[in-house]
Amino acid sequence: MLFARFCRIAALLVISGLPLAAHASGAGAAIEVPNLVGTPLAIVALSCFVLAYVSVIAEEFTHLRKSKAVVVVAGVIWVLVGIAYAQAGVAGASELLKTQIQEYAELLLFLLAAMTYVNTLQERGVFNALRDWLIGRGFRPRTLFWITGVLAFFLSPILDNLTTALVMGAVVVSVGAGNPRFIAIACANIVVAANAGGAFSPFGDITTLMVWQKGLVTFREFFALFVPSLVNWLVPAIIMVFAVPGSEPAKLETRAEVKPGGYVVAGLFALTIAMTVSVHNFLHLPPALGMMTGMGVLSIYGFFIRRQELNGHGENQDGSMAVQIPAGFKPAKRPFDIFISMKRVEWDTLMFFYGVVISVGGLGALGYLHLLADATYTDLGPLTANILVGIASAIVDNIPIMFAVLNMNPDMSHGHWLLVTLTAGVGGSMLSIGSAAGVALMGQARGVYTFFGHLRWSWAIALGYAASIWTHLELNAAAF
C-alpha cells in the first residue's frame, strides 16, 4: 500500500504538468496565460497543492476528510495567483477564476439534484428491494457473478458507478457470507462493470458529465462507446468467471418493501433525465437547469408523501409534534423530508471536487499545465497521450486528470475526445484504489475485497482496457 501511495504522489506531479489552454474558454475574449512557473509564488502554490493531495492520500490514517485540505489550498493558490499577476503587471486573474467557478457551479447543481434523487430512492427502499430480491432467489455463485455484473453495467449509466457498486456489493457480501473467494472476485467484477457502464453515459461518472457539459460530446455520441465499454467489462469477466466457486448457496428469504411513492420517484428520475437531455440538446441550455427543475418536481411530490405519512408519526400537518416526546429522542421511522435526502448528499466529495477544480485551474493560470504540452499531445500524439491518461487514472483520481485535459483543449479529432472519455472512465478499474467504486467496496467488504486481491486480476482488467481501445479504434474509425 505504501508503494501505491508513493505512485499516486509521483503520478500527480506528472499530471500537474499536463498543459492548459492558453485562454479561458468563457463567453468573453481569450485571456492569455503568462508563464510564471519559475517564480517563487508559483513554486509555493505547487508545493501547497502537493501537500494537500498527500493529505488526501493519508485520509485513511489521519481521518481528516479529503475535502478540507484541498478547499483551503484552493483559496491559497488563487491568492498567490492574484499576487503573482499583480507583480507581473498581468490582468485577467479574476476572469479566469470566475470561469472556473462557473464550470464548477454547473456541475455542483447537476450532481446535487442527481444525488438527491438517488438518496430518495434509497430512503424509499427501492435499492433494498432489488438487493433482497436477488438474495432471495438463491442463484448459484457463477450466475450471481453475471447478474450483478450485468446490473452494474446497465445501472451505472443512470445512477452513477459508486451507488451502483454499493448496491451490487451488498448483494454479493450477503450471499457470499463464508465464501471470501467468491466475494473478492465478484467485487472486482462489479468495479469493472460499474466503471465501464459509466463510460458511455454522461450520467455515469463525473468525468463523462464534464465532457458532456463542455459540449465536446453530445448525448447520442456517448453511445458510440457502448460496445468498447462492454468489451472492457466482458474480457476480464470471462477470464475471472472460471475462478468463481460453483457451490450451491443457501436460499435466503428476505423481504424488503418499497415505501409508498418509491416507484413514482423512480419514474420522476427517468423523466428528469429525459428533460435534462432535451433541454441541453434542443435548447442548448446547461444540463443543470433540467436536473434542478426535476428536483423541484421531486420536492413537490415529496410534500404529498409527507402529508400522507404525518398521521402515522404523531405529528400535525404543520410539522409540529402532536404528542410530547422526550427531548433528543429521534424516532427510527419518520415522515419523508426532501431536505434530509439533500443533507445526505456526499458533500465531502462535492467539496473535494471544488478544491481540485479550483486548485488545478490556479496552477494552470500560473503556467504549470503547459510544462509537458509538447511531451504529451504534441510529441507523443493524442493516441498515446489518451491511453496514458487512462493508466494514470488508476493511480490518481480521474477528476483532476480530465479537468486538466478539458482545460488544455488539445487540437484532436472527435474520435480522440471519445477515446479520452473512455480511458479516463475505465482506466481506474485496473487498481482498486483507482475509482470511487473500488474504494467503496474495499470498505464494504473490508478484509475480503482488498487492494492485493484486486491486483491479482489487474492483468485481465488491463487486457480488457487494451481490447476496449482497439474496439473503439476499429468501430469508430470514421471519427478520427
Image (spheres, helix red, strand yellow):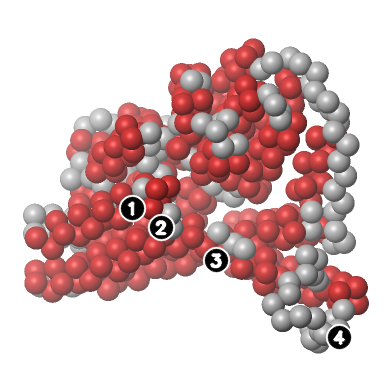
Q: Quadrant of the N terminus?
A: top left
**Rendered residue at 59%/15% (across/down):** 239
Q: Earlier in the sequence, mark 4 or mark 2?
A: 2
Query: In the image, 17: left or right of 183?
Result: left
Residue type (three-letter) at the residue carrying disc 4: Ala
Foreground mark, 4 or 1, reads 4
Tell me the CA gap for discs 4 and 2: 41 Å
Q: Amino acid at mark 1?
A: Ser
Q: What percent of the width, then of the height, locates residue 334?
A: 79, 70
- Residue 217 sits above or below residue 116 on the image: above
**Quarter holding residue 232:** top right
Check if mark 2's residue and mark 1's residue have beta carbons within 8 Å. Answer: yes
Q: Earlier in the sequence, mark 1 or mark 3?
A: 1
Return the residue at label 1: 55
| Number of other residues with Cα within 10 Å of mark 4, as a class: few under 14, some 14 to 19, many 20 or more | few
Measured Cα–Cα span from mark 3 to mark 2: 25 Å
The residue where tag 4 is placed is 322
**Residue lying at the far top of the rendered structure:** 242
Mark 4 lies on a secondary structure that is loop
Q: Position of residue 264 (x, y in %)?
A: 83, 59
Q: CA distance from mark 3 to mark 4?
A: 36 Å
Q: To which residue does mark 2 refer?
A: 64
Looking at the rendered image, the quarter that the C terminus falls into is: top left
Q: Give the vertical position of 135 relative to 397 (above or below).
A: above
In three-dimensional space, the C-alpha distance between marks 4 and 1, rounded to whole angstroms, equals: 48 Å
Say which residue appears at 79% left-offset and 75% top-offset. Answer: 303
Q: Say the numbered circle drawn on residue 109.
A: 3
